[in-house]
Image (tube, rainbow, N blue to C red):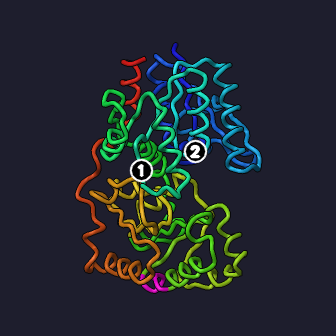
Amino acid sequence: MKKLLLAAGGKPGALLLAPLYNALKKNGTFRPLAVFASSKTEEPLSRELSTCFGIGDACGTVTLGDESPVQQLASVITGMESVIAREQPVLVMVCGSDNAALGAALAATKSGIPVAVADAGLRSHDRSDADEINRILIDSIADLHFISEHSGEYNLINEGVADEKVFFSGNLSIDTLVALMEQAERANLAAELGLQPKKYALVLLNPAGTIAAREPLEMILRLLKKMSGLTTVLVPLAAGLEELMKQHKLDKAFSRVEGLVMIAHPGHAGLLALLRDSVLLITDSEELQAESTVMNVPCLTMMDNTARPATIEIGTNVLVGIDEEDIMSRIEDILHAGEHADSSRRNKIPEKWDGAAATRIVEVLGRVL
């Protein structure tokens, strides 16, 4: 069997890798090997993804230390080079846009191994974003580009990538959504938390993102106070969020907000179940933008750009930056069907966001390898 190496680092990459690994294994033509680059304190692959997609103990790891981004990239390159030399795959498939993905792509191309990339061509056009630079670099050296939406194709063609190297496969993260929701259907997490479906807003906060400074965190606190007067507000605590609140001496202020429910992070399947039952998603990252579009949940993203324009063009996503008044106005309109309500309602699900992206990728690989 032809051996394929699938490489990823953090959670976004793992959500792409897991369904692809499963599809390759079921196909029988290929022998997939999953390799994750992660620190000693991080779990390379969550148990729920490992169990759901049958990966088990079949994944390898490249261990990263507490290093600078440049040092981590060097560690990934040398670590992946060793794996490639040992396993001799016919292709390295890169999943994600972090340093782990870039390092795997560089190691493969320097080792003379073809590189394929999932979610190719996505662009936020924000050069201050490290992931944006990684996406551009990975795509520039890849031999095969599997795109998840039409914007990816336009971007790649404009950057000089040949048509025959671009394949429209769909969104792998929706494959993961479909699989995990089968698990989530068996549990009613909202009810366990005492929440009624469509009677609460879900808020995801990234402690390493926009709210890392005290001023935006204070803005979030004011926003949550106003929101909690309209509906229950649910905040899953991402790693480092409680520490950030304590660092700025705002933890007690958050805990005193009536109608605000803060819970331990429920894992990705639990998060999907909570998203499905929520009336509104507010986030300061790209996490769950695609999933909220497929679930038809209005999404307000506190960013100025996104690498997934399909979620805005035909999905439920609206970019609102950190304009407190505008955000609150849109929240009120969504909850009460006001002026902005229609702008957060999708017309349709983006093409090929149907849970079959991995199957399409495997079919292409079967033809070209």
**Magenta stretch in the rendered image:** 226-230
Within 10 Å of the Cα at label 1, are there few (<14), some (14-19), or many (20+) other Cα atoms? Answer: many
Secondary structure beneath disc 2?
Answer: helix
* Nearer-the-camera pick, 305 or 149: 305
Marking on residue 254: none
Amino acid on which disc 2 is placed? Glu
Upstream in sequence: badge 2 or badge 1: 2
Amino acid on which disc 1 is placed? Arg
Picture coordinates of residue 317, whole percent (x, y): 36, 63
Marks 2 and 1, Cα distance to the nearest angstrom? Answer: 29 Å
* Nearer-the-camera pick, 66 or 132: 132
Picture coordinates of residue 109, whole percent (x, y): 56, 27
Looking at the image, which residue is at 33% across and 42% down?
Answer: 158
Secondary structure beneath disc 1?
Answer: loop
Picture coordinates of residue 212, whole percent (x, y): 62, 70
* Nearer-the-camera pick, 159 or 197: 159
Specify the quadrant of the image occupied by residue 214: bottom right
Residue position marked by numbered label 2 in the rendering:
48
Residue position marked by numbered label 1 in the rendering:
123
Q: Is residue 277 visible?
A: yes
Q: Are marks 2 and 1 in contact (CB under 8 Å)?
A: no
Looking at the image, which residue is at 71% across and 38% down?
Answer: 75
* Nearer-the-camera pick, 262 or 317: 317
